[in-house]
Amino acid sequence: MMNRLIESVESLLIVFGLRILWILPEPFVRELACLVGWVLSETLRSRRRIIEQNLRIAFGPDLSHARMAHIRQQSWINIVMTTVEVLRYPCHEEKYLREVQFEGIEHIIDSLSKGRGAILVTPHMGNWELGGAGMARRVPFGVIARPLNQKPLARLMDNLRAQMGMTVFAKKSALKGVLAFLRRGGVVAFMLDQHASRQSVAVPFFGQPAKTVTSAAMLALRTGAAVHFAHTRRIPDGNIRLRIQPAFEIESTGDLEHDIFQATAQYTLAIEAAIREHPECWLWMHRRWRKPKPGDIQKKSPGIGAKKGV
């Protein structure tokens, strides 16, 4: 009873907050988002330590304090701006979609013409949600998502993604639905830039082993779906640019575990290259490296062999 009451209060607060956010003028909201992002970058000390540790791992001791501060601030501003844009999407749908610029969409169209669907591997860069909304206007588009712990927020995100035209697959029970979606000629996106403790392998990421989910590689090898790397970034005019690369060329040797490791390593290398090019657009406050042990980089993936019947 108490949990339902708390959820009801949370839902009311969310609706009230959204109504206010929707009616505020766009320039004011953007200025406010920048201010909030800057404040968070300077006041959340625990996250600040994580960001600085991550930047040292990625770029080494030569990264200046000024450059580190700039990346930290811009990363926070980007995540706040992304949140605001997603929440304001219902009342600014056409405006935001016009701001998404595509580069390389022909690569996806070419892969879909082969009749096996396509897989996108992508990081949390720029505004990945608006990038997904733009994709959903052009091709059948689905995403793998881990439900948020707060049920009202989880319902809100499900509704927003549905309005954006995306098909959402719950992470724990996604396999059957994703396979069917690919067979129907859909595109499924996997976010591969966060730590994964299960169904994962430790692959090099900025020179350090990082546990990375193997689902994208496993599906690609077993279905023949083409895999493309894509990422979004903010450009100086305020728009979002979504860049899609040609399909990866992954060799199948017959050793499933080896092939999954090699494919996942290639996907991760593409993510690293994009982050190196636009570090201010990435989600640095996530603990990507979890104290890897010596010799962690290997080609073993727990649980992979158990699903050979897929």
Image: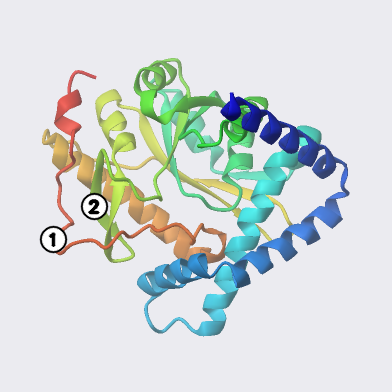
Residue 89 visible here: no
Q: Position of residue 295 (x, y in %)?
A: 13, 61
46 relative position to 43: left or right: left
257 relative position to 264: left or right: left
Q: How far apart are marks 2 and 1 (CA)?
A: 10 Å
Quarter holding the C terminus is top left
Badge 2 element: strand
In the depicted structure, whether residue 42 falls above or below residue 127: below
In the depicted structure, whether residue 235 falls above or below residue 109: below
Q: Where is residue 28 in the image (x, y as percent from the top left)?
A: 85, 56
Q: Quadrant of residue 71?
A: bottom right
Badge 2: how crowded within 10 Å, few (<14), some, or many (20+)? many
Sequence-first tag of 2 and 1? 2
286 relative position to 140: left or right: left
Q: Residue at x 57, y 29 (%)?
A: 3
Give residue 202's mark: 2
Q: List the residue tagged with mark 1.
A: 295
Q: Quadrant of residue 86?
A: top right
Seen from the viewer's position, the closer of residues 168 and 188 is 168
Seen from the viewer's position, the closer of residues 244 and 196 is 196
Which amino acid, mark 2? Ala
Seen from the viewer's position, the closer of residues 181 and 46 is 46
Q: In which quarter of the image is residue 118?
A: top left
Badge 1 element: loop
Badge 1: how crowded within 10 Å, few (<14), some, or many (20+)? few
123 relative position to 268: left or right: right
Residue 162 visible here: yes
Seen from the viewer's position, the closer of residues 170 and 120 is 170
Which amino acid, mark 1? Gly
